[in-house]
Amino acid sequence: MLVRYAVRRAIHAALLLFAISILTFLLMDLAPGDFFEDALLNPRASPQTIEALRAHYGLAGRAPARYARWLSSALHGDLGLSVAYNMPAAQLLWSRCRNTLQLTSATLLLTWFIALPLGLWSASRRGRWLDRLCALAGSSLLAVPDIVLASLLLLIAARTGWLPVGGIGGPTHVILPMLALVAGAFPVVLRHVRAAVLEAAGAPFVQAARGLGIPRRRLLLRHILPVAANPLISLFGLSLAGLLSSSMVVEVMFSWPGLGPLFLDAISARDTFVILGVVMLSAALLVSANLLADLLLYAADPRIRVER
């Protein structure tokens, strides 16, 4: 059952990526010009030379033919050539993708490591000072845009010199962008954890178990948390998707050599296959995260197995 469900979800994910690739290719084709457009203004560059360069980099021909060539190559791991860097786009993307995954995975683990126990503790003490303090901190962080939080962290680090700013030269270089992402993701996860636990705590069987005199800690860990796990598993995939989108901006601000700065440079240079590669790689990461969340939810919730 799990294998059949996983195969069906994987087919849906593949179709979604196929649709995203078509839409992205069409949008780029509708944009005026390409990397060699400015070269036509140079009297030393003949139109024949420009066309030969376009053919070499896979930019010549009509859009359907170019997409068919790219799709055939992409299925074999070849994402085309980067015009700006004069190297395979896949080689360029994998190195940047590792840095983005390093940042987002560390952020995701730290966010849930803090928000999950704090949300459980806050929900178990509803209305007390800790619950009010968590609500105040979460609301304050949600009210400040992510770019403002990142700017404040960058300013503090530059003024104090406590942490290195920009680049990737060691483990400490990931701390600032990671803190900026945690500050944006933490209040959302905290609120959802608290809400899921409070909803599970109000279930009739939990009230009955509480009436039987089951200790609060055992009631929380053995009865409430398994019920609250379903929405939290779904939130796990959504939080990773939000981190990947937020990391694009944070990476640019902190000069972290991930997919964000590469995507910005590729748009400025109109580097077609790098743009397409970044979009598809980001979409693949998002789809994979949601697929993992669906599989975990399938394994955790017997109702889904009955419905399927």
Image (cartoon, rainbow, N blue to C red):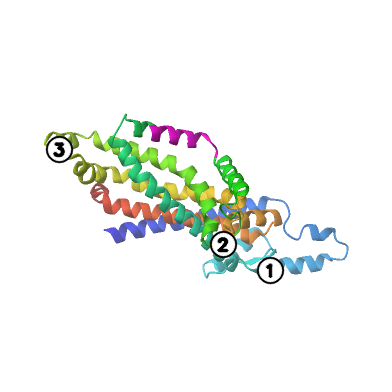
Question: In this view of the protein, can residue 237 be seen by the observer?
Answer: yes
Q: What kind of element bears circle 3? A: helix
Check contact, mark 2 vs mark 1: CB within 8 A: no
Q: Position of residue 154 (x, y in %)?
A: 59, 47
What amino acid is at disc 3? Ala
Residue 297 lies left or right of residue 30; in this view the side is: left
Give the residues in magenta: 133-145
Residue at the extreme right of the image, as rendered? 43
Q: Which residue is mark 3?
A: 209
Residue 96 numbered tag: 2
Q: Residue at x 31, y 50 (%)?
A: 297
Q: Secondary structure at mark 2?
A: helix
Residue at image point 23% right, 45% down = 221
Q: Residue furthest left?
A: 212
Q: Amino acid at mark 1?
A: Asn
The amino acid marked with disc number 2 is Arg
Query: Residue under circle 1?
Result: 86
Which circle's residue, 3 or 1, is located before the other in the chain? 1
Cα distance, mark 3 to mark 1? 66 Å
